[in-house]
Amino acid sequence: MVKIALIGAAGQIGTPLGLLCKASDLFDEISLYDLVHVPGIATDLMHIDTRAKVNGYLAEDSGLKKALTAADVVVVTAGIARKPGMTRDDAHLVKSNSLTLLKTNASIIRDIFTEIAATCPTATCCVVTNPVNSTLPIAAETLKKANVFEATRLFGVTTLDVVRASTFAAHALGNGASPRDFKVPVIGGHSGATILPLYSQAEPSVNLSEEALAGVINRVQFGGDEIVKSKQGAGSATTCMAYAGFRFVKAILEAKNGQSVIEEAYVYLPGISGGNEIATKLGVDFFAVKIELGKAGALKALPIGNISDNETRLLGVAIDDLKSNIATGLAFMST
Ligand code: LMR
């Protein structure tokens, strides 16, 4: 029996993610939680001819607890999305008094993880809610406070950056190659300059001029902004994020079933085998690297490996930004 709980399931990421989960036939039970609409979405999904039983829970009558009970995997997409003018630069946002992405989503994440700690502390949890660079430390601190934190089971989903890195490389090459033919590691975080695609390690190699490559790197780093601008006030990435989130969930399930799987994710490095050395070298505890996934979650954080001079420079910038994003999340938890 495999149960997944989708928290924020009536949102524009949660709804297509629910469809992908139901269509996949990977689950026996899918529970949907949100403040509105989920009973209807569950009924709708139940007409699809796969085996998963789908239940929708609203906040009343301990709905979150019911949705989380016995969940093996939890995906959190709850919270508000970015609108034009909002950045994911948490340090800047927290200084302003306006309603910001972090201010709104930080307490949502804390409250959801308080319930996860009480109801399904051994579930594998995937955080999609932005700003991931700060919401993951908030989730980790909440679990730590409840004495149930296990870094091997807590992931910030950065798969969309990996998806974009191969997609945009294929677009730039324009030679008809499929984006899926490229594997490009992406490390760092999930916001602007903290996102670092390592094209020096791309397989097959991405042969572009220095200028064209710089353009592709920038597009991966600021791909989220491209969608925010294009949606003209209607929000940020939803469908491609659901696709990426589902790819990550599928990887977790494959690993639980004994397959050897490697995916990038934003994690608390010191709690994962091999992670401490990377954290000490970089000077940050939360960071996205390639993770070897296994039955119990993250088995190993893989070393970054050799990178180009330009990537080394960009890594320095990413770390500076990440330090401030992480500090912002931790500061929220200490207040
Ligand atoms: C993205 O990468 O597109 C998402 O994280 C949404 C955003 O706010 O950019």
Image (tube, grey):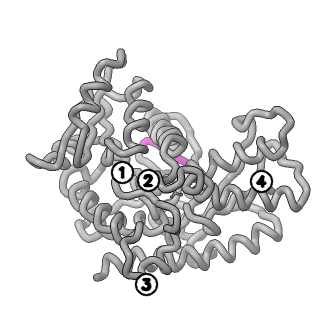
Q: Secondary structure at mark 1?
A: strand
Residue 267 vs residue 220, the one in the foreground = 220
Residues shaded magenta: 290-295
Q: Is residue 36 visible?
A: yes
Q: Is residue 205 left or right of residue 104?
A: right
| Measured Cα–Cα span from mark 3 to mark 2 | 24 Å
Mark 3 against mark 1, which lies toward the viewer? 3
Comparing 284 with 232, the one in front is 232
Q: Residue at x 76, y 74 (%)?
A: 313
Is residue 77 shown above or below 110? above
Q: Of the two numbered discs 2 and 1 on the same chain, state the one appearing first in sequence.
A: 1
Between discs 3 and 1, the one toward the N terminus: 1
Identify residue type, mark 3: Lys
Q: Earlier in the sequence, mark 3 or mark 4?
A: 3
Whole-Å distance between the Cαs marked 3 and 1?
Answer: 26 Å
State which mark lies toward you, 2 or 4: 2
* 291 within the magenta span: yes
Measured in 3D between alpha carbons, the distance from the residue under mark 4 to the one under mark 1, in whole angstroms, is 31 Å
Q: Would you say the beta carbon of the disc 3 residue lies within 8 angstroms of ligand 1?
A: no
Depth-wise, is mark 3 or mark 2 nearer the camera? 3
Q: Where is mark 3, residue-wise?
A: 95
The answer to whether mark 2 is within 8 Å of ligand 1 is yes
Against 324, residue 294 (above or below) is above
Q: Quadrant of residue 33?
A: top left
Q: Which residue is mark 4?
A: 201
